[in-house]
Image (cartoon, rainbow, N blue to C red):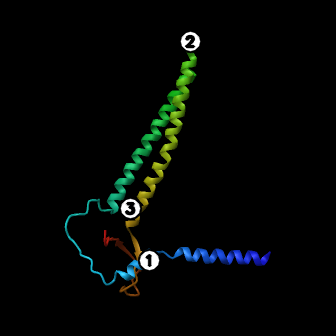
Amino acid sequence: MKKSILILVAIFLINMESNAQQQSQFIATNSLSTTKHVSLSQSYSGPDKDADFYMRRSKNYRIVGWSTLGAGLIASGAGLLIVTNNNDIYSSNNDYAATVLFLFGAVSGITSIPFMIMASSYKHKARAMVSSQKTGFGVPGNVSKDIVGITLQIPLGK
């Protein structure tokens, strides 16, 4: 029994290692001799993803999150107010409308959660773009290694 488990684990590890090798890893070594033309034209259509971009996106997602949460609270409150109003003859129609409003409010409130999470995520990305980074190269020993830095990403290729 122990031998069969050991053999199965060894086969699994060999299979996992062989699946980790991909053909795209060898493209970089083969393309060293080829030349790539660098163009400085305005062909880039997307926005620069800097700290301001992520802060705007965070603000937009937070607005959507608060809006859906507020709409959900208002709809649920209206549903509860309709249920508590028992002065009408047609209470079955009011009960149905109140149920629909309350469920719509609950779904709207639950829908706001992913928007709030994404807003927080984009805010953290914006803060990470300009943060203190440890850079020890070329800095004297008596100076702090925490230096404020700006990350610049230059995409190469397509």
Residue kind at label 2, given as amino acid type = Ile
Residue to which mark 2 is pinned: 89
Residue kind at label 1, given as amino acid type = Gln
The label nearer to you, 1 versus 2, is: 1
In this view, 44 is above or below 21: above
Quadrant showing the C terminus? bottom left
In this view, 118 is above or below 32: above
Indicate the position of residue 155 as horizontal and vertical percent values.
32, 70
Indicate the position of residue 151 as horizontal and vertical percent values.
35, 71
Which residue is at a point 75% across and 76% down the rendered structure image?
Answer: 4
Contact check, label 2 and label 3, Cβ < 8 Å: no
Quadrant showing the N terminus? bottom right
Q: Residue furthest right?
A: 1
Q: Which mark is residue 25?
A: 1
Residue to which mark 3 is pinned: 126
Name the N-terminal-most of marks 1 and 3.
Answer: 1
Residue kind at label 3, given as amino acid type = Ala
**Neighbour tally class for label 2: few under 14, some 14-19, many 20 plus, Cα within 10 Å:** few
